[in-house]
Structures are given as structure tokens and as C-alpha cells.
Image: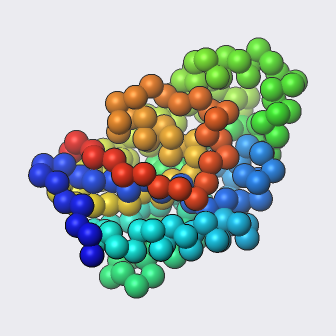
Amino acid sequence: MISLRAAARSRVILIRPGATSFDEQGRMKGSLDMPLCERGRQQVENLAEELAGIRLNAIYHAPCESAGETAAVLVEGRDLRPKMIEGFRNIDHGLWHGKLIDEIRRNQPRLYRSAAENPETICPPGGESMDEASNRVMKAINRILRKSRNQVIAFVIPDPMASLVAAHLNHEAMPGIWKVETDAGSWQLIDAAC
């Protein structure tokens, strides 16, 4: 087993769940609860193989079916139970749920450009702003990090929420929502201050 321990920090394996049918279609899934599609199940199997040599202390996941399914596969053969965290819920896209990203680009070009240039200010009709979602998820992340000093923990969070988490933990600017909305089946290692 590979040990990723580092002094006075937590190591976070940030995992995007496998794809859903909406990801494949280029639709905005947001906080809709959807299962993995066939490609998503294959992505999760690949993730499990890639992460098999990493000793994890805990796996936390978003309260959606694709994240739960992904976490369940990742704990197979490990002495861990995945823990669902309500604060990891994906961004509420309100009336944008289920819309094609290209449809928003065509029908609401000014709003589309604004979201690309200043994602933190965008609030879909009937949804939550990226800034509100970011505050919610980081409150949950910070609680976990305080309890997880010098541990290796995994967060299974769908995009675009996963990209918001990565930006905060890496002290980077908020990502463009349109570039990350349908990313799935990948992981990254982040050193996180506790």
C-alpha cells in the first residue's frame, strides 16, 4: 500500500463520480439525483483500480445516487463505510436542471457569458448562487478537515461542486461553470491545511 501521509496536513482525494446519462448528453444535472450510466460504472471500476494502492482513512460522499454508487465501489475490500454528507449536495440549478448547456448558451447568451466570466455571481432562476453553494460545501469540508489531521480522506462530489471544492482547497479562482458541469470519473490529490 502507498502511504500519502504528510505532517500537519490532510491529504484529500477529490473524486468526481462516474457519469450519468445527463453528463453524456451535456445536460445540467446539478442537484438532481441520477444513477450512473454504463460508461459511469466503467469509470468507477477504473477509479477503484487506480486508487486501490492508496490507504484511505475515510470516504465521504455527496447525497446523490451517482456519488453513493461510486463511494460504495471504492470501499470494496477496505475496512471503511462511506459517509454521506448533506453539505456536499451539488449546486441547485433551479429551472436550469435538465437543460442542455448549449441551449442556455443559445437562449440566454448574456447570462451564459456572465456565468463564464464571473461564476460566483450567477444564480440560476429558482436555484442557488455558486457563492452560496461554495459557502455551504466549504463549511462541511472544514468540519471534516479539523477532525482529519494527518489523514488521507476521499471526497466523492459531482461537478461543478467538486471544482468549487478544488478551487478553494488549492486557493485558486472559482472555475467556469460551463467547463466543468459534465466532468465525471476522475480524481485529484490535494494537500489541505487543517
Quarter of the picture holding the C terminus:
top left
Q: Is residue 102 visible?
A: yes
Q: Of all residues shown, which one is farthest toward the bottom?
A: 77
Q: Of all residues shown, which one is farthest toward the left?
A: 7
Q: Which residue is rendered at x = 73% and y = 28% of the image?
A: 125
Q: Which residue is rendered at x = 33% and y = 82% of the image?
A: 79
Counting from the top left corner in percent of width and height, residue 102 is at: 82, 33
Counting from the top left corner in percent of width and height, residue 142 is at: 30, 44
Q: Nearer the viewer, residue 91 or 53?
A: 53
Q: Nearer the viewer, residue 11 or 144?
A: 11
Q: Which residue is rendered at x = 81% and y = 50% of the image?
A: 25
Image position of 98 with respect to 15: above or below: above
Counting from the top left corner in percent of width and height, residue 187 is at: 47, 55
Q: Which residue is rendered at x = 72% and y = 37% of the image?
A: 94
**Quadrant of the rendered structure where residue 160 is?**
top right
Image position of 157 with respect to 174: above or below: below
Image position of 45 with respect to 179: above or below: below
Counting from the top left corner in percent of width and height, residue 29 is at: 71, 48
Drawn side of residue 72 relative to residue 19, left or right: left
Q: Is residue 147 visible?
A: no
Quarter of the picture holding the N terminus:
bottom left
